[in-house]
Image (cartoon, grey):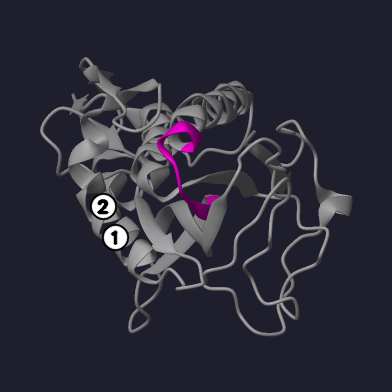
């Protein structure tokens, strides 16, 4: 199953899956986050008084996971994430190692604690490990600074998704993973929705002149908080959080 935990304003999500499920899993998790981090268009009456329009959503069916998710119109801004996912998959290793009843950690051992908490796969006959990687969804706000300093972008919430990617060698294995990965991704979505709706830090609602410092006003009928999707490199000498920090349930204590 997929799991998640929190380190301050950074949330860590963990998921093992088959290579053909990467786009579905990332889209499901990130679009669910964006739906909760978007508001309807502001209709300002003056610089500080406004009313809200309606926020449209739609249900999207996954192709390789038995799951559907709700997506808002911020999907228009997520088009670059597909390119990012494609880049991740192009980086997959050509390892021919096979595993049975256990996970092989694909990150260099010098960079990762051996207790790194990826879920254990227990019932697949043959899975070929391809890639261990990270992709993040980051929400930020712009803070103007005195001339000649440039505007500062300050992240106020970051979700990092750790992916352990495999290649199923049989149709039966892939069919089982359609169900098991759907359950684990669905669990992640339920947990993050519960957490994201609790009281926590959000940028102050902006005036009309400050709107673009907090929200993206370029979309026709919704305003997501400013965000970006990026690949998170594993840097030599920087360890990934070990299992002593890990919780099987999403903790919401560190906003």
52 left or right, relative to 134:
left
Most common SS among magenta residues: strand
Residue located farthest toward the left when viewing the structure as drawn: 220
Is residue 89 in view? yes
CB under 8 Å between callouts 2 and 1? yes
Spatial distance from mark 2 to mark 1, Cα to Cα?
6 Å
Residue at horizontal 61%, vertical 21%? 194
Could you tell whether 89 is left or right of 138 in the image?
A: left
Q: The residue tagged with tag 2: helix, strand or loop?
A: helix
| Residue at the disc numbered 2 | 82
Q: Identify which residue, 49 or 123, lies in the foreground.
A: 123
The region drawn magenta spans 159-173
Residue 71 image offset from top left, x and y in percent: 29, 26
Place residue 111 in its image quadrant.
bottom right
Look at the image and tell me in which quarter the C terminus lies: top right
Looking at the picture, does residue 137 appear above or below residue 36?
Answer: below
- Mark 1, Cα crowd under 10 Å, few <14 / some 14-19 / many 20+, is few
């Amino acid at each position: 199953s997929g799991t998640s935990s929190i380190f301050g304003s950074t949330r860590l999500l963990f998921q093992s899956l088959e290579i053909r499920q990467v786009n579905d899993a990332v889209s499901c998790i990130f679009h669910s986050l964006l739906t909760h981090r978007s508001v309807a268009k502001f209709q300002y009456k003056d610089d500080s008084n406004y009313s809200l329009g309606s926020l449209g959503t739609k249900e999207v069916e996954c192709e390789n996971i038995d799951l559907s998710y709700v997506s808002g119109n911020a999907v228009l801004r997520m088009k670059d994430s597909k390119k990012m996912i494609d880049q991740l998959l192009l980086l997959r290793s050509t390892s021919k190692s096979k595993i049975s009843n256990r996970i092989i950690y694909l990150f260099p051992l010098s960079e990762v604690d051996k207790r790194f908490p990826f879920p254990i796969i227990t019932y697949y006959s043959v899975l070929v490990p391809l890639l261990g990687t990270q992709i993040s969804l980051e929400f930020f706000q712009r803070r103007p600074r005195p001339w000649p300093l440039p505007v500062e972008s300050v992240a106020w919430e970051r979700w990092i998704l750790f992916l352990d990617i495999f290649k199923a060698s049989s149709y039966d294995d892939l069919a089982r993973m359609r169900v098991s990965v759907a359950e684990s991704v669905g669990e992640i979505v339920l947990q993050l929705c519960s957490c994201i709706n609790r009281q926590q830090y959000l940028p102050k609602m902006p005036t009309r002149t400050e709107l673009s410092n907090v929200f993206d006003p370029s979309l026709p009928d919704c305003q997501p908080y400013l965000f970006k999707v990026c690949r998170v490199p594993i840097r030599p000498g920087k360890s990934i959080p070990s299992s002593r920090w890990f919780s099987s349930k999403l903790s919401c204590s560190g906003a």
